[in-house]
Image (spheres, helix red, strand yellow):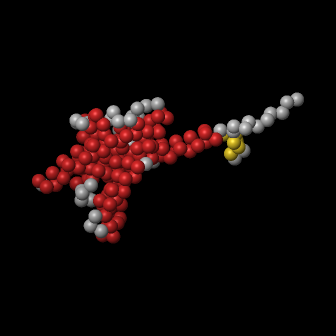
Amino acid sequence: MTTEQPSTDRASIDGSSVAPFESQQQKKSRWAFLIATFCGIGYLKPGPGTWASIATVQLWLFTAWALGTRGGPHGASLLLAAGIAFSLIAGIPAAGIAARESGREDPGFVVIDEVAGQCIALLACPPDWAHAIVCLALFRLFDITKPYPIRKLEDLPGGWGIVFDDVAAGLYAFGIAALLRIWY
């Protein structure tokens, strides 16, 4: 009769045997996929990037309106700055991890890059539907067509290439929207 000895390279968690590296990797992946998909919006079909852009605009408008005058004259811009900072600081590594673990270079379900770009496009935009729709349309136009040098930014390694082409599209949209606000 043989008795099975517990392996020394495995740890018991809640009664199940799991390798320490596997549990750490699984935990890391969950946060990365949650951020990379913008809380699952990246799984919506068709056009997950468009859904993420729409959700970003709606979230920004709702929060800006809810804050009202309590946010001060620059409350909407501060919200966007926080969104940009979060989507870059957390989004770049999350996008890289999600891409690596899915085995794809720039998976369609990774939409945190659209969040970053859409927030940039909305900077200095009055929090109303008319301006928001213009910024949304411009950002999606530049994100889809990727005029020079946006397409070159996709060559950056890992999460940097995934996110920074959308940052550039957001900058293009911001510039054109600012010119439109001046002229009209």
Question: In which quadrant of the rendered view does residue 12 lie?
Answer: top right
What residue sits 43% from the left and 39% below the top? 96
Q: Is residue 144 visible?
A: no
What residue sits 42% from the left and 41% below the top? 95
- Pinpoint residue 67: horizontal percent, then vertical percent: 34, 66
Question: In which quadrant of the rendered view does residue 145 lie?
Answer: top left
Task: State the residue lying farthest toward the top.
Answer: 1
Q: Quadrant of the C terminus?
A: bottom left
- Pinpoint residue 91: horizontal percent, then vertical percent: 41, 46
Task: State the residue lying farthest toward the right.
Answer: 1
What residue sits 65% from the left and 38% below the top? 19
Task: State the residue lying farthest toward the bottom.
Answer: 70
Q: Quadrant of the N terminus?
A: top right
Q: Nearer the viewer, residue 11 or 47?
A: 11
Q: Is residue 179 visible?
A: yes
Q: Is residue 70 above or below residue 99?
A: below
Q: Nearer the viewer, residue 96 or 133?
A: 96
Left or right relative to 73: residue 16: right
Q: How many marks?
A: 0
What residue sits 69% from the left and 39% below the top? 10
- Pinpoint residue 29: horizontal percent, then vertical percent: 52, 42
Left or right relative to 85: residue 18: right
Left or right relative to 181: residue 94: right
